[in-house]
Each structure stands twice: as C-alpha cells, then as structure tokens.
Amino acid sequence: EDSPTLLSLLDSCRSGMGSRMLRLWLTLPSRDRAIAGARHDAIARLIDAGVEPLRDALRHVSDVERITARIALRQVRPRELTGLRATLLALPDLRAQAPIGTPLLDDLHAALQPSPDIAEVLARTLADEPAVLLRDGGVIASGFDAELDELRAISQNCDAFLVDLETRERTRTGIGNLRVQYNKVHGFYIEVTSSGLDRVPMDYQRRQTLKNAERFITPELKAFEDKALSAQDRALAREKLLYEQLLDALQENLATLSRTARALAALDALAALAERAATLNWCRPEFVGHPCIEIEGGRHPVVEARLAESGGGDFIANDTRLDAKTRMLVITGPNMGGKSTYMRQVALIALLAAIGSYVPARACRLGPIDAIHTRIGAADDLANAQSTFMLEMTEAAAIVHGATEHSLVLMDEIGRGTSTFDGLALAGAIASHLHDRNRAFTLFATHYFELTEFPKKHERAINVHVSAAESGEHDIVFLHAIEAGPASRSYGVQVARLAGMPGSLIRQARSTLDALETQQRMADAQIDLFAAPPAPPPAAESSALERALAALQPDTLSPREALDALYQLKSLIREQP
C-alpha cells in the first residue's frame, strides 16, 4: 500500500473531498471527451492565473461533503458544524481567488455562492468553540435562547454560592478546614476532617464516611443542589432541542450544501492537476477525430517521479505512433529493458487525457479511445484455485471478446505460463486475432523471438525493441529507448548475472545457450506460425450400414418390424469388407 501510484502522485489536494473526487475521476473515467476538454481548459486557465493562491485558500476548507452526509443522517457533531460554518463564511474570499473564464470554472464559481442564511444560522446558533459531544453541553451560543441562558446562569452561579456557604459555615462552626465541594457521584457536600467532627452542628446530615473525614449535607445545601442539578439537566435538554431544530433547518438546505461540496471538491481536484502539470512539466493533450495515438517524448509519470526522488537519473522519454496504418507494435527486448514500463506509460497517458489531466509528454494527440484493456503481470489466485496460466488465459479471453477498433490493448509476455510450444502458439493466435478481428491499438510485448516474423504477414503490425548495449565481454547496459525493428537477442544470461547468480551457474547457462543456438541455426525448416489453418479433411462417404442405422426409428417399430430390421443390419455387417 505504501508503493507509489498514479493517484499518490496526482493527489496534492487540500481537502479530503478533493482527493475523493480525483480518485473517482481516475477509477471511472468518462468517454465523453467534452468533459475532459472542459477540464483541460480549466487547468490551462488555472496555470495562467497562478494556482497557489487558490490552493492556499482551499487548505482551510472543511470536508463539506461528509458533513452534509452526516447532516442528512442527523449524526453530525457540533465541531463538524463549526467547520461547516467557517467554510461557508470563507467562501467569499475563496471565490475571489478562483479564476473564471472557462465554462467549467464559471459554473464552479457560481456554485460557491450558497444561501447566506445557512452561514448566518450557524453563526447565531453555535458557540465559538462548542463541546465535542452534544451531551457535554456548551454547544449552543449564549444569547441565542433566553430560557437556556437563564438555566445556565443558575449553574454558573454555583461557584459563588459554594464559596459564600463555605465562609459562612466556617464562621458558624469554628471548623477552619471545612470545605464545600461537588463531584458527579455524590453531588454537593460539606467535608470535615476527623479533628473537627466534635464541632459538627446538629443540622449536618452524614452523606459519606471516609478514612480521615466525613462528608455532610445541610438542608440549605440540599435545596441548592436540587435547584442546580435540575437546571443543568434542563439546560442540556434545552440544548438538545435547539440542536435538533438547527438540524431541521440545515436539512432544508441539503441540496445547496451538496452542490457547494461538489464544486469545492472539483475545484480542489482541478487545482491539484494544475499544480502537478506545472510542477512536472506536463503538456495538454490534443483530441482529434481520426483514430491515432501519437505521443512525443512520453514518460511514465510514477517511475519518473521515483527516479527524481531517489537521484536515479533522468527518465528516458520515448515516442509512440499508432494510426490506421499501424495498429500493433510487437515489442521485444531484454528483461529489465523497460518493455512493461513503456507499455504502461502509454496506457497512463491515455487515462490521464481521458480524465481531463495534462499528460507527461512533450506533445500528445489522441483519437477516440473507448477502453484500455491490459494483460500485465501474473500470479496464482489460490483462493479461487486458478493457476498463473489460467488467469492469463481468462484475462486474454476477456480482451479478445471485448476490445474494439477504438480500444487500447496491452499484452505483456502472454503465454509464458505454459510450455514453450503451447505459449508460442497461443501468443501468435492471440496477436492474429487482435490484428485481424479486433483491429485494436495493441502493444504486444513478447519474449518469443519467433513472433518478430508476425509483421511480415500482417501489414498493420511493426516490430520495435527496447535497446540495450553490451559492455565488455559479458555485461549489459540498458538504454531504455524504443527503436524500430526486432531485438537481436534477449540477454537473459546477462540479466541473471546482474541479479547475483553464482559465476559457475552463469558459465553453465552460457555454455548451454551456445549449444542451443547452434542447434537452432542448423535446423532446416521452421514452422510458419501465421499460415492459414489447414483445411479439414473431406468427410468420408457413409456406408450402407450407417445409412440403415440412421434411417431407423425405434419408437415406431412393432416387435415384428424390429426383428426384421435386426436381421437386415446383421446382413449388412456380413457384406462389409
């Protein structure tokens, strides 16, 4: 969960509702390019106007979306309502920081103007710093309700009364250390230590005995206790009633509050995307009507950010061009060379453009894309009793059934979960199906070098490879650049050496590899993976016995007819050669 993701890179939102809105855009991107285009316009305007003043204003916004939901459920707490109050009162200043000038920003600007009655009611009703829970009291503002103020005055006069009573009782009894106190368990009491018990008056009634003291109550203190505690209970009941009335008033404005919450969340998400675009040097994608994916200097946003954080150097940008004439790239190259990273970056750029974000590239032009289908990565699903290969085939089946000519398909190392021949045959057949029938834009990475022959018989496919160079006798340097043509070799042994395999093991593997490559060169014939499937053999002519059996209708035969038919079949068997 701590691994960097596209969402964690994009989410510089100032509020929880902004983060949730951004997550929603990523997980449920719209196919309506007008929505994405409106967001592109808004981001461009925010960048031009300077987005940081708006983001500073959004920093102090409460989670209006969740507060509104809790109001609807009548479960909102007093402190949450003070947060709502502060946000509503701050909206005029926030609107002043929000640029206008695009249809989307104009709509959001208008939605940030809720009825002033809501903020006014909250300001009059709630205390400046209410208790966390309603049951603790002190939630309703002083001066809002005369009856509540009167009840509170009775409770608040307790301290003065107790000090006065303590002074009078010390004078009357001559007990200098006598104390008048209160706790929630025993209420009000007069405490006298053991040394003063012989001077306790007759009107003192024992309430509690302690180890070194006694606690008493007098008729006067009892009468005050009844009055004070009754006032506290009645004040709390009055506060609860007033709070419920406040919730009733707020529920009449739920639609307005929800509209304000959505506008704040969208503005926060757009401001985050604008900040990311400006900070990370992303470009605005261009939408066109004809089918194409043209990316100049594309980069994987998450990997690039991780390299920058770790000081791992600059990310190697790559171009991508798919159109009506080139719909499939067959990608080969060494393990760890960057095939999967390249494929993912193309998908992420398409996704970012679809949600209305700028993209990590120098330039980007995209035609209509209705879906992104991926078959990347493999792991057993033990809970559902599915092997790696079964998962591969299940996901691949969903792709070949669901992809259209407007889809982007990523197929990474399909077929590696089974035997070499099975995997190669399936990979070739899947590539042919995607090319000939689905006609989807496809990035097809493979470790089967036999598939580099695929473009020779499929005109809309071309070979590309991730470049690498040998350094010294057996070392390899990954260049991570996408170049035209197939890879010359996979460099698997060199990668194993980089992974720390023992030298003796590497030497044995290299010797075995040399022998296998020699055998391959000596082979006289190769199977044509992409030839048309052989025609089925002609159907054999049916025999007289088969025709007689086919003509029988057992349910309609009488016993005599069934016996005659049996003798006839026996005769036909004797006549067979």
Image: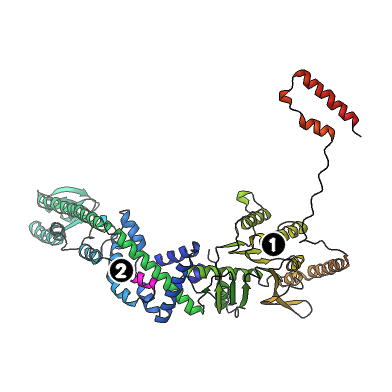
The residue wearing badge 1 is 431
Along the line of sight, the residue nearer the viewer: 556 or 72: 556
* Residue drawn where x is 28% and y is 73% of the image: 92
User: Is residue 62 part of the magenta span, yes or no?
Assistant: no
Badge 1 marks a residue whose secondary structure is helix
In the rendered image, is residue 361 in sight?
no
Image depth: mark 1 or mark 2 in front: 1
Segment colored magenta:
102-109
Give the residue number, with chain letter if any, for mark 2: 87
Q: Up-down: is 341 above or below 187?
A: below
Residue 378 position in % (x across, y down)? 65, 59
**Residue 226 visible in this rendered orientation of the protein:** yes
| SS at badge 2 | helix
Image x and y of residue 365, in percent: 55, 74
Give the left or right position of residue 221, taking residue 102 as reference.
left
Question: Residue 107 colored magenta?
Answer: yes
